[in-house]
Image (spheres, rainbow, N blue to C red):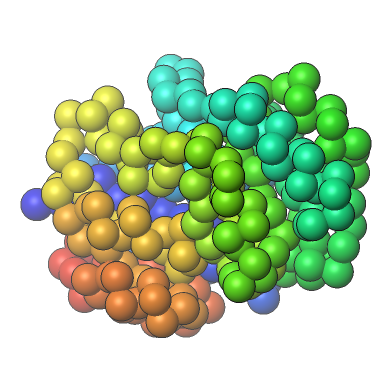
Amino acid sequence: MIKAAFFDIDGTLLSFATHSVPDSAWAAINAMRERGIKVFIATGRERDMIPDAVATGFDGYVTINGQSCFDEHGEFRHQSIDPEGVRLVVEQVEAGLYEALFMTKGYSFVSGHSPRVLHNERHCGLTYAVADPRSALDLEIMQMCAYLGEDEEHIVAEGNPHVHTTRWCDDFCDVMPVGGGKPEGVQAMCERYGFTLGEAVAFGDGGNDIAMLKAVGVGVAMGNAGDSVKAAADFVTTDVDNDGIWNACVELGLIEG
């Protein structure tokens, strides 16, 4: 029996076309809550980057790909990247190998606005502040994003034993601490509320959702997800702009149609 539902934001709850949550998705979430199912966000965004559309209405938040988890009682999971791992990335950025986004628990900045960075900002409806990458050396960094193509992703992790990477889209890869990720955050949330991973359903569309979809009892890929995400899921629904959340919840028997 499903007792908890986890939702990615971008491309899952939030439409890239409208930058809003479809009414049908809210209807599904409210219907689940009426049935006693807890609903949670599971996102790569940090707290201050969560859009107003989904900043309330959920029982808890798994943010920064699992590195920071909180609910109405406060933060209960917190994991950052070893400073040496941050230093190695900063050196690569300074060497001109790529631009990077640096994320703390409540603040993010980018090292520069390359075409990849600008494309991603437009895609997600975000604008990042630009700052000297060396300023990251004095901060607690919980995640970085390296703006590299898939064939270049190896550059960021080679020789850096403090991080591992996953990819949400073509523009960049997420750079996380070893032992971090959405599955760890989801598990921490489930333990806090007395659920098992097998009693959870998760919805996602990006490469950084694959491990989460595999970890829970039922993994749902959006219709707009990539082929690798769909292959990892137990169920594939329609896309975010075509009632994907609602349709999946009805088909899975989580709500009545």
Quadrant that contains the C terminus: bottom left
Report the residue at 42% width, 24% height from top. 77
- Eyeballing the image, is 195 above or below 76? below
Question: Within the image, what quadrant is residue 249 found in?
Answer: bottom left
Report the residue at 26% width, 59% height from top. 214
Q: In this view, does 185 lie to the left or right of 162?
A: left
Q: Given the current orientation, which residue lies at the most extreme front position?
A: 159
Q: Where residue 120 sits: x, y (%)?
A: 74, 65
Residue placed most toward the observer, 253 or 92: 92
Q: Can residue 132 be seen in this view?
A: yes
Q: Where residue 83 sits: x, y (%)?
A: 64, 25
Question: Within the image, what quadrant is residue 251 found in?
Answer: bottom left
Q: In this view, does 256 lie to the left or right of 171?
A: left
Q: Is residue 127 visible?
A: no
Marks counted in the figure total: 0
- Eyeballing the image, is 144 above or below 69? below
Report the residue at 25% width, 45% height from top. 4
Q: Where residue 74 sits: x, y (%)?
A: 47, 18
Report the residue at 37% width, 62% height from top. 210
Q: Where residue 109 sits: x, y (%)?
A: 80, 40
Question: Within the image, what quadrant is residue 248 found in?
Answer: bottom left
- Eyeballing the image, is 4 above or below 169? above
Residue placed most toward the observer, 146 or 235: 146
